[in-house]
């Protein structure tokens, strides 16, 4: 019986080739046409994989059936890139303007495609089924939920789900997993402030939308420290402010956008009622009106304790006790949370951090490709540990 590490080692060159090919064709959410075509072609080349394309616009699904009754495990990869112009200088840099795999999704796809290939060759060593989910738009606005609504968890019914992410917050070569909430619930908000524009030399004739917006930004910074329980970690971030077009003009309109993060579902559901009175109070005081829109994003991502216990044992086989870590929870969001609401789920990190490494979502982000082998081995062994006949 061939050792799992040996099977992974055989795929090293192909794993790198796939990652680099995908890195060159990054596409943002729901525009992953080239990416989806590449993924589907790879899946078609793997024996015993049933392929479905065009799910939730660009989603792809592969299904491996062993022919023996048992549970079904879903393994997820996200396909989308970010609207960032790459500055890595890599020989295989992005060939698309203002698009870059700056969050490691190219690596995620390469790992799951390789996991699918290996599991297809050893399907006599486990029972049930493995579903390989390649989803669009993880960054925003989310592809997992529409794929679920399209029925990907139904035929066959999915019992377990797993996903991973390269993580600069952990030392390179480590693996990290923890029970409970790992990632935050998210929302996106937009605030349009309507004042009365006019000449910069005559402010008394105007209602300054830019000044009002600045006061709103300052007030929102106090929401977490003064309106929320300090034992409930939360974040309110204003990410953009657009107002005005000339140095001698007082703008009559300003638009703010931002995001909230929290681990607490009750706070997540109540953020509209928390933020809007703050906006209204400032606008009333300044004589402006406003339009406030808050769009719920992803729920908190929670790892099932039983799944985590199995994953820890799996990780020991892959890297040993000294390289299995318990990561801190992050305020990052992840729409795999929708899948975990309907299955027993486990999300783990592959440590990719080193001194001076670029953070996620940075124009110079890159990672050591040998780390992908750890991810593949972990996913393959985890599938065997969950579904093995033995």
Image: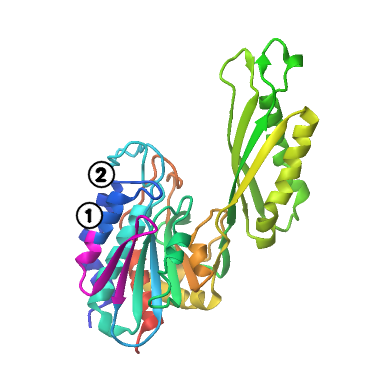
Q: Residues within 10 Å of mark 1 (few under 14, many from 20)?
A: few
Please say whether residue 51 is one of the residues in the magenta stretch. Answer: yes
Residue that badge 2 annotates: 92
As drawn, 5 above or below 124: above
Kindly indicate the quadrant of the structure image that contains residue 126. bottom left
Residue occupying image coordinates x 36% and y 41% = 99
Q: Seen in the image, is 123 located left or right of residue 224?
A: left
Q: Residue at x 43, y 50 (%)?
A: 354
Mark positioned earlier in the residue sequence (2 or 1): 1
Residue 249: x, y in percent?
63, 15
Label 2 environment density (alpha carbons within 10 Å; few <14, some 14–19, many ≥20): some
Q: Is 245 or 154 nearer to us in this picture?
A: 154
- According to the picture, the residue beneath numbered tag 1 turns out to be 17
Query: Residue 95: within the magenta?
Result: no
Residue 224 in sight here: no
The residues tagged by marks 2 and 1 sit, at their Cα atoms, a distance apart of 10 Å
- Magenta span of residues: 41-64
The x and y percentages for residue 43 are: 25, 65
User: SS at mark 1?
Assistant: helix
Please tell me whether mark 2 sits on a helix, a strand or a loop: loop
Residue 254's image quarter? Answer: top right
Q: Which mark is residue 117?
A: none
Residue 131 shows in the view = yes
Q: For this rendering, which residue is in front, 324 or 303?
A: 303
- Residue at image location 72% in from the left, 32% down from the top: 289
Labelled pair 2, 1 in contact (Cβ < 8 Å): no
Front-most of residues 251 and 219: 251
x and y percentages locating residue 316 in the rendered image:
42, 74
| Image-based side of 317 in relation to 145, left or right | left
Point 31% across, 72% down: residue: 63
């Amino acid at each position: 019986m061939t050792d799992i590490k040996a099977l992974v080692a055989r795929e090293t060159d192909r794993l790198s080739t796939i990652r680099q090919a995908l890195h060159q064709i990054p596409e943002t959410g729901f525009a992953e046409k080239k990416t989806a075509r590449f993924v589907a072609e790879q899946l078609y080349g793997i024996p015993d994989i049933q392929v479905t394309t065009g799910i939730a616009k660009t989603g792809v699904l592969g299904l491996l059936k062993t022919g023996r009754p048992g549970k079904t495990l879903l393994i997820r990869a996200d396909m989308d890139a970010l609207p960032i112009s790459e500055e890595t200088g890599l020989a295989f840099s992005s060939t698309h303007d203002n698009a870059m795999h700056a969050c490691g999704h190219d690596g995620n796809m390469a790992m799951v495609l390789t996991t699918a290939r290996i599991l297809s060759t050893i399907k006599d060593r486990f029972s049930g089924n493995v579903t390989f989910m390649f989803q669009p738009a993880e960054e925003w606005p989310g592809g997992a939920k529409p794929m679920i609504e399209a029925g990907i968890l139904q035929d066959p019914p999915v019992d377990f789900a797993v996903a991973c992410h390269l993580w600069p917050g952990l030392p390179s070569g480590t693996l990290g997993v923890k029970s409970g909430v790992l990632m935050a619930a998210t929302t996106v908000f937009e605030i349009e402030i309507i004042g009365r524009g006019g000449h910069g030399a005559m402010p008394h004739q105007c209602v300054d939308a830019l000044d009002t917006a600045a006061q709103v930004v300052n007030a929102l910074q106090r929401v977490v420290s003064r309106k929320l329980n300090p034992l409930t970690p939360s974040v309110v971030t204003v990410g953009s402010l657009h107002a005005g077009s000339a140095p001698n003009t007082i703008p009559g309109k300003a638009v703010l956008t931002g995001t909230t993060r929290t681990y607490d579902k009750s706070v997540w559901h109540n953020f509209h009622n928390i933020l809007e009175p703050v906006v209204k109070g400032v606008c009333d005081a300044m004589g402006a009106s406003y339009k406030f829109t808050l769009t719920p994003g992803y729920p908190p991502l929670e790892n099932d304790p039983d799944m985590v216990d199995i994953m820890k044992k799996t990780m020991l086989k892959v890297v040993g006790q000294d390289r299995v870590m318990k990561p801190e929870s992050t305020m990052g969001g992840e729409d795999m949370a929708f899948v975990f609401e309907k299955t027993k789920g486990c999300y783990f990190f592959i440590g990719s951090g080193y001194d001076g490494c670029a953070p996620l979502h940075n124009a110079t982000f890159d990672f050591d490709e040998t780390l992908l082998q750890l991810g593949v081995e972990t996913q393959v062994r985890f599938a065997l540990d969950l579904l093995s006949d033995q």
